[in-house]
Image (tube, helix red, strand yellow):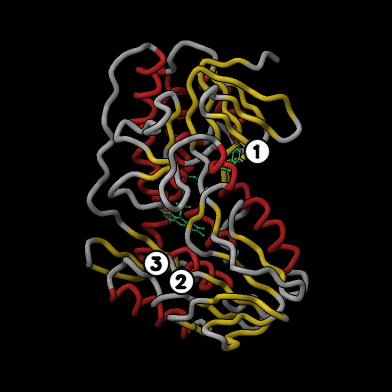
Amino acid sequence: MSSNFDLILAGAGHAHLGVLRLWAGGKRPAGRIGLISPDPHAWYSGMLPGLLAGRYQDAQCRIALEPLCRAAGIEFIEGAVTALDAASRTLHLANAQPLQAQWLSLNLGSLPKPPVTADEEMEQLAVKPFAGFIARWNQWQQHPQRLAVLGGGAAGVELALAMAGQVPSLALISATDLLPGHAPALRRRALKHLHKAGVQVIERCPVERIEHASLIARGQVVWQGPRLILATGASPLAWLDESGLACDGKGFIQITPTLQSVSHPQVFATGDCASLVDTPRNGVYAVRQGPVLASNLAQALQGKPLRHYVPQRTALALLADGQGGGMLSLAGFTLEGSLIGRWKDYLDQRFMSRHRINIP
Ligand SMILES: Cc1cc2nc3c(=O)[nH]c(=O)nc-3n(C[C@H](O)[C@H](O)[C@H](O)COP(=O)(O)OP(=O)(O)OC[C@H]3O[C@@H](n4cnc5c(N)ncnc54)[C@H](O)[C@@H]3O)c2cc1C
């Protein structure tokens, strides 16, 4: 296989799935285009809590990439990017020759922030990458043990509610109050569900280190146990730091409203790996970038002018309550119940069916 492409899409994140879907519908620009992903599937985070709660099977929560790429006329390359030289747009892969492209688009997601220290007596499992997380979680559940989830955002709350009752004891630990950035009423609703499910909630507890199977915050042991799930806030992939791309103070790629790197316009970036004003890191915003990205990549390949992505002012948050119901938050208004859960299921499955060419 030649290593030169007109365009490479790196990562099968939400925005790239939208690009593939649109191009599979017949709007693909001319040129040699490839998609790189370390996993033959794109896992959908919105359905992960339902999978852990036993309401979904693996195959319902992931999209097979090869058929979607084939339908879009794009080469699927299974591999993980390990380094990038932005100036030459060369991607280095684990176990394969480097690939070079005229244009690059990065939709690589993020990883949970690791805690300050590691500890041999406490196994840590990051919620991303999802395939590795699910495989290890299933192994853990052959011998369930005392468990803590670190991270009090929407992901941590949903995971704790999904796992409650499946382990002998479960704690949810948050550096701040639960669900920062959401309406206070959503926190109260979540606390009610967590207490009902028997989850020990420890708020305003910034864990600073781990020693001898103990989590330590402000010099005090706050939890002890053998297993810890990391659902902490987003951190960037480490190798972006040496790519030459201009990054913000946290290491995320700084982009313009056209979704191009501020330092390397031939590199586009979207979703969690990118940094753009008024654009929070979640799937909703990454999905909305997809159509603009598809249009701008096609225009860029033809040397035509690009559109601006304008982030929406607010986004609907829908959290699974672990029992088939849901909690909703939008612009300070909150609601919960079984109908919300059914609506979330409908939206999640609609997203999946839009992108699924066939079930693997
Ligand atoms: C449990 C949980 C539940 C969530 N629920 C919601 C929700 O309901 N709504 C919501 O809006 N957000 C939710 N989120 C947040 C959401 O998952 C992320 O914000 C969203 O996935 C970011 O999308 P993305 O397009 O940036 O990348 P992602 O969808 O994360 O995809 C990144 C892609 O890059 C690939 N990749 C990673 N590293 C490499 C590499 N080195 N080389 C090549 N490819 C690579 C990955 O395999 C993956 O295909 C949830 C998160 C979690 C953890």
* Nearer to the camera, 143 or 247: 247
For label 1, the residue is: 82
Element carrying mark 3? strand
12 sits left or right of 189 in the view: right
Comparing labels 3 and 1, the label whose residue is closer to the camera: 1
Q: Count neighbours of disc 2 (C-alpha within 10 A) and say few if under 14, some if 14 to 19, many if 20 or more.
A: many
Q: Which residue is at the far bottom?
A: 220
Disc ID at residue 326: 3
In the image, the residue with mark 1 has its CB under 8 Å from the nearest atom of ligand 1: yes
Quadrant in which the N terminus is drawn: top right
Query: Where is mark 2, residue-wise?
Result: 152
Q: Position of residue 254 (x, y in %)?
A: 39, 41
> Does the residue at mark 2 contact the one at mark 3 (Cβ under 8 Å)?
no
Counting residues from the N terminus, which is met first, the one under dot 2 or under dot 1?
1
- Looking at the rendered image, the disc whose residue lies closer to the viewer, 2 or 1, is 1
The residue under the point 72% across, 69% down is 123
SS type, badge 1: strand
Quarter of the image with the C terminus in it: top right
CA gap, disc 2 to disc 3?
17 Å
Amino acid of disc 3? Gly
Q: Are marks 3 and 1 in contact (CB under 8 Å)?
A: no
